[in-house]
Amino acid sequence: MSEIGKKDLLLALVRCRRRPRLAGVDLSGLNLQGVVLTGADLRGADLRRTDLSNADLTAADLALADLAGAVLTGATLEDARLFHADLRNAECRGTSFSGADMTGTHLEGVQHPELQKD
């Protein structure tokens, strides 16, 4: 019998649920380009160095999630909750954060016009 990897498990969960519950799950380093996680519960998830290019994270709950070094190029995080999330050194070219709650989010090293501190 073959083992199921964490990426295969994640994709199976996403296909089965309208709003996947992935709070606290270790998804670090995965290639999740284009994945649809609309409204997903990713509170406290480990997404370090995860490739989420062109992913749809609209209205996802990413409170306290670790996205340090993640690739979010072209991703949609509109109306997402990023309360105290760690986005340090994340790649955010073309990422949409419209309406996102960025309260307390760590943004050091992030290059994005909407997220530049005054």
Image (cartoon, rainbow, N blue to C red):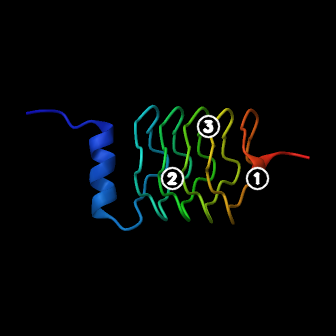
**Residue 22, numbered label:** none
The secondary element bearing badge 1 is classed as helix
Image-quadrant location for residue 100: bottom right
Quarter of the image where the N terminus is located:
top left
**Horizontal arrangement in the rendering, residue 16 relative to residue 78 (left or right):** left
Lower position in the chain sequence, tag 1 or tag 3: 3
The residue that appears at 76% across and 52% down in the rendered structure is 114
The location of residue 29, given as percent across then percent down, is: 45, 31
The residue that appears at 51% across and 39% down in the rendered structure is 47
Q: Nearer the viewer, mark 2 or mark 3?
A: 3
Image-quadrant location for residue 33: top left
The location of residue 103, given as percent across then percent down, is: 76, 55
Q: Circle 3: is it few (<14), some (14-19), or many (20+) Cα within 10 Å?
A: many
The secondary element bearing badge 2 is classed as loop
Image: 43 above or below 70: below
Q: Amino acid at mark 3?
A: Glu
Distance in Å between CA atoms under marks 2 and 3 = 19 Å
The location of residue 18, given as percent across then percent down, is: 37, 68
Query: According to the image, label 2 marks what residue?
Result: 42
Q: Amino acid at mark 1?
A: Glu
**Horizontal arrangement in the rendering, residue 44 relative to residue 27 (left or right):** right
Q: Amino acid at mark 2?
A: Leu
The residue that appears at 43% across and 39% down in the rendered structure is 27
**Residue 91, numbered label:** 3
Query: According to the image, label 1 marks what residue?
Result: 114
The secondary element bearing badge 3 is classed as loop
Q: Circle 2: is it few (<14), some (14-19), or many (20+) Cα within 10 Å?
A: many
